Image (cartoon, rainbow, N blue to C red):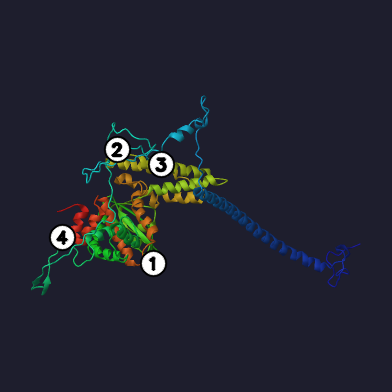
Amino acid sequence: MARFKQPPSDFVCPYRYRCPELQELSPAWVFAEYQRAKVREHEHWLVREQMAAEISQLEKTLRQQSEEIDRLRAENKLLHQRKFKSRKKSGSKSNTTKTKKTGKQRGESQKENKKRGAPRGHPPWSREVPERIDRTVEVAAPCTCPHCREPTDLSRQGATSYVQEDIILRPQTVLTSYIHQTAYCPGCRRQVMQRLEGEIPFAPIGANAKAAALYLRHEIKIPYRKIAEIMSTLFGLDFVPASSLGFEKRARKNGEPLYEDLIEKMRCSDIVHADETYWREDGENVIAWYAGNQDVAVFRIDPHRSADAAELLLGERIEGLLVTDAYAGYNSISVQARQSCLAHLLRKAREISELLAAMDAPDYASKRFCTNLSRLFKLACAIEVPHGLKARKLLTERFLRLLDRICAKPLSFPKTETLRKRLIPGAREHAEVFAFIEFDGPPTNNHAERALRPLVIFRKVCMGTRSQRGSENIGIFASLAQTAKLQECPAIDLFQALLTGSPSSAQEVLFNDSS
């Protein structure tokens, strides 16, 4: 029977709407669903790819959060350990073993009997015998023993003596009546008088008392009210706490030129240490800046902790070696060389090492990096710098090669990687770590830290100042008092010169120079 390859043009399938091969479904509907299935499959694959990307991102976030939680737990553990340190001291096995005869632990009896010695490097001190004796008191031998109340044998007498130094409480103040003969000056057209040395004209309180009040305020770091109480209790001199402000006002007139001279001397020095801390002014935080060396010390209180504030103190250029920490505010100052404090870098490496040790899964590469870095910096601090310039440059290059070897590979721990990037070649601190070798300076900024320490204690005692004028007084008198200590000049002598003399005479007292 012949078959048609193509259906006739007027052919209509009897199963067009209900095909028995398609379970009574419409072929047109089945074909339409088949075409839509390809589109849906493509949409489903897109959704699966998006879901896979989201799952991957969530897994990455989960890992980062787990690492962050581990790091925060380690930091929290370190904070608790620093606040509540264990009193148990780890001893060697030999200290815990018992002796054969006594049965006691070795080291136990030694710790009980051994007295704590002086700190290492602490010079011995003993009171010198006074050259003069103001009075001599003779005491007769006792007839009765002061201990057991038995009668003593006066036929067997002896003698013992010692010198005791004491003070006089509430000494009588010296009241001086000045009677000046005046003369008429045709040039000034008024009566003038002659001023004596050490005299403050028309002042109800003398120079010694005012200098003592300034000494208590700016050298001993005592508040104004306590100064008035001390002067009244110990010396019988009464004045209100506000009088100390008047003493500062008079001394500042001669102290300001001397303060400006200290700034110029500091800027021309071969080595300058700089650091900053916060100060309180009328309840707000301001910044106390320091710059100085072994000869001069300059303090300045500024409202800002910025590069402009650093330039106001240090100037635009330092003709020498500037020793600071890693604060970026000093970057705008032009210097011959800058030394980054190795003590800060050592402390940073130690903190990261303690943090890594407290973590459950520490990064051993980062831990090894911190250990090697600490060893290198400790070696650099302990090394003896050679005298020749060529030898110092060779030594600097050798240390830089060791530093480059330590910082060669990147690290996975973020804090360690940040520290490594600060020290790699091309970074700013890379050339500042060992600058002290070439310029024969200090490797740390310990001088500035110690210079700021009295001001920090003063801040805790007096809670800061109430006005900008008071902050300026703190900067001026702290600079003069600290410089006097460096010049081995008694600060009270300097304050007396500021109250009774001129800026030039005060400068002679400060630097012990009569030329």
Residue depth check, mark 1 versus mark 4: number of the one nearer the observer? 4
Toward the viewer: 459 or 151? 151
Residue at (19%, 52%) from the top-left corner? 512
- Residue located beneath label 3 in the image: 376
Toward the viewer: 291 or 140? 140
- Residue located beneath label 2 in the image: 141
Q: Residue type at mark 2?
A: Ala
Rounded to the nearest angstrom, the CA distance separating label 2 from label 3 is: 69 Å
Rounded to the nearest angstrom, the CA distance separating label 1 from label 2 is: 64 Å
Relative image position of residue 102 (x, y in whole percent): 51, 27
Q: Considering the numbered disc 4 on the image, is that residue within a helix, a strand or a loop?
A: loop
Q: Answer left or right for 23 relative to 64.
A: right
Residue depth check, mark 3 versus mark 1: number of the one nearer the observer? 1
Q: Considering the numbered disc 2 on the image, is that residue within a helix, a strand or a loop?
A: loop
Toward the viewer: 225 or 376? 225
Q: Residue type at mark 4?
A: Glu
Rounded to the nearest angstrom, the CA distance separating label 1 from label 4 is: 39 Å
Relative image position of residue 513 (x, y in whole percent): 17, 52
- Lower sequence index among marks 1 and 2: 2
- Residue located beneath label 1 in the image: 282
Rounded to the nearest angstrom, the CA distance separating label 3 from label 1 is: 45 Å
- Lower sequence index among marks 1 and 4: 4
Q: Crowdedness of circle 1 by 10 Å Cα count: few (<14), some, many (20+)? A: some
Q: Residue furthest left?
A: 186
Q: Answer left or right for 495 relative to 402.
A: left
Q: Decide: marks 3, 1 in contact (CB < 8 A)? A: no
Give the quarter of the figure containing the N terminus. Answer: bottom right
Identify the disc placed on residue 444: none
- Residue located beneath label 4 in the image: 197
